[in-house]
Image (spheres, helix red, strand yellow):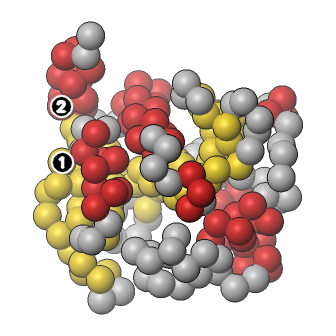
Amino acid sequence: MLHDPAQNLIRLESPRLLFREIVPGDEADLFRMDSDPEVHRYLGNRPVQSLEEMQAVIQMIRRQYTDFGIARWAAVRKEDSVFIGWAGFKFHTEVRNGHRDFYDLGYRLARRFWGTGYATEAALALTDYGFDVMKQEVLYACTHLENYASQRVLEKAGFLKKGTFKEDNETIYWLEQSREAYEKRKAAQP
């Protein structure tokens, strides 16, 4: 589904992508992505079963925009406004791995966009946003122990593995990046 990027919902951009608010009307794109069992392989193997589920997810995300000023954003290609997935921050008010009231950097792409570099591009843009705009001192991310592709993406964006924890009977890596490490990494870039 094509979306008009001029909707004033654009929150961030990277060289090839625009990140905009997720809105009612995105459920078909989200459903195509989240109903794919491969997309959910490392997410508890619970693909979405209906458009109604996606509508509820969109409502929850919209509440996060209102409550916390930020949430996951739709990721669309600049060249043609094609939805490729989502990326952004989720503010966790519940305890997760001993942490509470923190921002979790995350992303999810439709399978046809895997291996394109979009996930790394999104993670890098979000990391910049988290430190430069949100002024965070530490950013957090999580990925399944066996999701090697996601681990590589997060490491390219400067995140370091800080341990593992159990969630829904799965082993999850906990990753962090400090402002100090971010600034050193940025200063070292040509």
- Residue 109, image x, y percentages: 55, 56
Q: Amino acid at mark 1?
A: Leu
At a point 18% along the width and 22% down the height, the residue shown is 184
At a point 56% along the width and 52% down the height, the residue shown is 113
Relative to 104, say whether 165 is above or below: below
Instruction: Looking at the picture, tell me which residue is in the foreground, 87 or 17.
Output: 17
- Tell me the tag on residue 160: 1
Q: Which residue has dot 2 on it? A: 181
- Residue 118, image x, y percentages: 50, 42
Discs 2, 1 touching: Cβ within 8 Å: yes
Total number of numbered discs in the rendering: 2
Secondary structure beneath disc 1? strand
Quarter of the figure with residue 179: top left
- In the rendered structure, the answer to whether residue 53 lies left or right of residue 177 reads right
Nearest to N terminus: mark 2 or mark 1: 1
Task: Answer whether residue 72 is visible to the viewer in this image.
Answer: no
Instruction: Looking at the picture, tell me which residue is in the foreground, 144 or 70.
Output: 144
Q: Amino acid at mark 2?
A: Ala
- Residue 93, image x, y percentages: 44, 64
- In the rendered structure, the answer to whether residue 101 lies left or right of residue 48 reads left
At a point 24% along the width and 61% down the height, the residue shown is 174
